[in-house]
Each structure stands twice: as structure tokens, then as C-alpha cells.
Image (spheres, grey):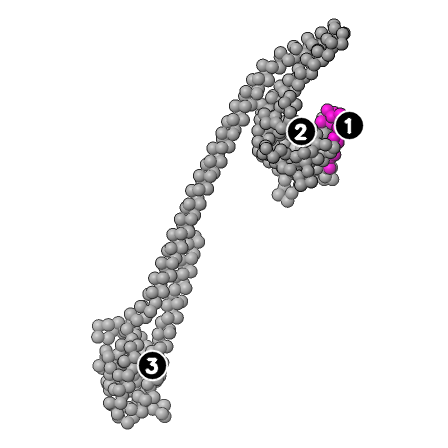
Amino acid sequence: MPLLALSGIAIGVALEQAREFQDERLRDDLELVGRAIRLPLSDALLSDDIPRVQAHLDAVFELGRVYGASVYDTNGELVASAGVTERDLSESLLAEQVVLTGEQRDSYREVAGRDVYSQFIPVHDRAERLIGFMQLNRRAEDFEQSFSRLERIAWVSWSIVALALISILAVGYYRTRHQQRLEINSRLREHEKMAAIGQLARGVAHELGAPLTVISGRAKRLQERHADAESQRQLTAIRGQVDRLTRLVQQLLDFSRTPVSHEQLESVSQLVQQAASAVQHEQPEQGPQLQLELPERDVVIRADGSRLELALVNLFRNAMQAANQLVRVSVETTRNNECIIVVADDGNGLPQSTSAEQLVEPFTTTKPIGEGTGLGLAIVAHIVDAHNGKFTLQNRELGGCEARVTLPCSTTKEA
């Protein structure tokens, strides 16, 4: 609306200037007509040749630009006329000023019931003595008609543009509102789904936790009592499966737990080192290496340290399982006061059959059956989102996958 108002004001100012220019041009046209016949009229008046004066006025009237033309002597008495004129100007103040000053005058007047624009042009002899003056009348509506078409075109064009602009803005506004409403509803449904999954996971984890502890303990005691190889092999397999289920239960608890309980200033480098240390203890000696590239100036964020460390542990563990030889972890900062933790592996990258958005959903995994729970990246995304951060996955141009955790910085301090 302010844009439309400003454009309307601009058009109004431009039209007013155009009107003044048009009026000036019409006045100049009338003045040119007067100058063209002023010298012949002067000679005719000096010789008292009234028919020739009348012929000049008739010729001017026939041009079609003049509504009336007349010649007066210095006393304001009519000498000759053509068209609609005033018969006597002896009492006219404007005519008196022309006679006294010898200068041209003009004004809007009423002649024979019509509004006209009158131009009074002094007539001099060749010695520059005033011998009379002529009056050229043009209808005032000629000035309006010459401009009204342009004015109508301008305002109609402005109205069309304004209507189109308002329509575009209205459609865009309602479409944006509709899109925002859809996005909000989608997020609400996603949160409700995650809450339901978390509640289910918490219930399952609690129900499985105690029986698994009992099974593991009894299998251990049986191993102590039965030393034969077959019993040891079977009981070891049982305890291995129990351990896998125990890890699943722990991940279910991690996923269902409240993401953020207590926030405080945390060192990003320290969190990365702690998470890396926890993951490295799980890896075989000949497995992929974890390489840390930490900044000289440490970055500090406000976070729940234990929860964010858990997210990094799951992220590093997932990268180590996907890597062939190396996982590189680096910390970057941006001009927008953001901290980015980049985890890049040299593995096979993301599968084309599964999108990055699907990989962060609970129970989605690309690992073989029995090797993955599909909760690791879901836990990462869940915790990062609770810290007002952003978690993204993408394939690297040189191969492998790159994960980015973007978090708002709090401040910086010397490492």
C-alpha cells in the first residue's frame, strides 16, 4: 500500500507538470498566431484599411485554433472582429494595463457565456508607437481536452497496475499462509509422532531391561559351572545377543529421554574430545582412524553437555562404522556466530535409495539385519534440534559422507 500511494503521488505530480507544460504550449501557439499577423495589422491600421484588418482576422479565425479575434484602438473601442469577441473594452482594467505598459497580458475570462483564455497583444507601428491592441480568445476547454486523454490513460494504467499488484500480493500472501500452515501442521504431526515413539521406546526399554539383566547374569553363572567347549560356545552366543539387546535398550532410553535438562556454557573442543575418546575405545586396533582438527581458539556454546556428548558419540560411531580408513572431525565458525561440527568419512556415502531425511527418522538403517537399530542418527537429530541447531547429511564429491551439526555460539575463549 505505501508503494501504491507513492506511485500515485508521483503520477499526480508528473501529470500536474505535464498539465503546466501543455498549457504553456497552447499559450505559445496563440502567441505565435498573434505575432504572425501583428505587423500586417499594424500597417492596415496606420492606413485605416479596415477591410484589410478584417481579412487578417478572418484568416486567423479560419485556422480553427482561435475562438475569437478582434482589434481595438488605444481607447478600447472595437475596430474589427471575427468569431466571438467582446464589443467594448473601454472599461477593462486588463486592456488599460496593455495600453499603459505596452506589454502583452493574458487571463481567463467569460465571453458570450463561455469560459475563454484571452491574450491581449499590443500593436505598434514601425516606430514602436502603440496604435492599438488585439485580443485572441481560445476556449478554456481546449486546454482541458488536450490534457484529459493523457490524464485518463495515466490513471487507468495506474489502476490496472495497482489492481494487478494487489492481486499478486494477495495470492502470494494467502499461498504463503497456506504453505506455512501446512508446514506447521506437518511439524506438529512430526512432533506428535516423535513423542509417541519416545513413549513407546521408554516403555519397551523398561520392560526389557530387567529380564535382560537376569538372562545375562544366569548365562554368566552357567559359563562358570560348565567348562566344556560346546556349553561355552552356546552361552557366549547367548550373552552376545543379550549384550546387543542391552545396547538397543540403552539407545531406546537415550532416544526417549528428555533431550535437554540443564544448559550451561560448554567447550566444543572438550565435548568433541570426550565423545571421540568414548568411541575410540570401542574400535578395533586395525579399524578406521578418528582424526580431530580443533580450532586454536576454543568455541563455547550453551548446551546440555551430557546430551550433546551423547549425540556426538552416536554420530562418531556411525561414521566409524561407515568409514573405510579415516573419519575427519573439524570445528568451524561462521560470521553469523554459528559453530559447525563437520564429520566426514571415506566410506561409500549415502545410498541413493534412501534420502538424508529418511535416515534421521527412528528405526531407519542401511546396515544389514542384526547390525543396526536405526536410532543412532535419530538421537543425533533429536538432540541437535532441542539445542536450536541443525543437522544435515550429504555425500562428498570425493566420496564418503559428510555430516554437519550447526549450533549457535555463545562466546569464544582461548583454548
Quarter occupied by residue 91: bottom left
Q: Nearer the viewer, residue 49 or 199?
A: 199
Q: Which numbered disc, 2 or 3, marks the residue that appears first in the sequence?
A: 3
**Quadrant that contains the C terminus:** top right
Q: Which numbered disc, 1 or 2, marks the residue that appears first in the sequence?
A: 1
Quarter occupied by residue 305: top right
Look at 46% across and 36% down and name the residue there: 181
Q: Nearer the viewer, residue 255 or 11?
A: 255
The residues bearing labels 1 and 2 have C-alpha atoms spaced at a distance of 17 Å
Q: Position of residue 99 (x, y in %)?
A: 31, 85
The residues bearing labels 2 and 3 have C-alpha atoms spaced at a distance of 95 Å
Task: Identify which amino acid the numbered label 3 is placed on.
Answer: Val
Which residue, given by chain and number where applicable, does mark 3 sit on? 33
Compared with 266, 373 (above or below) is: above
Q: Is residue 174 magenta?
A: no
Q: Is residue 156 left or right of residue 365?
A: left
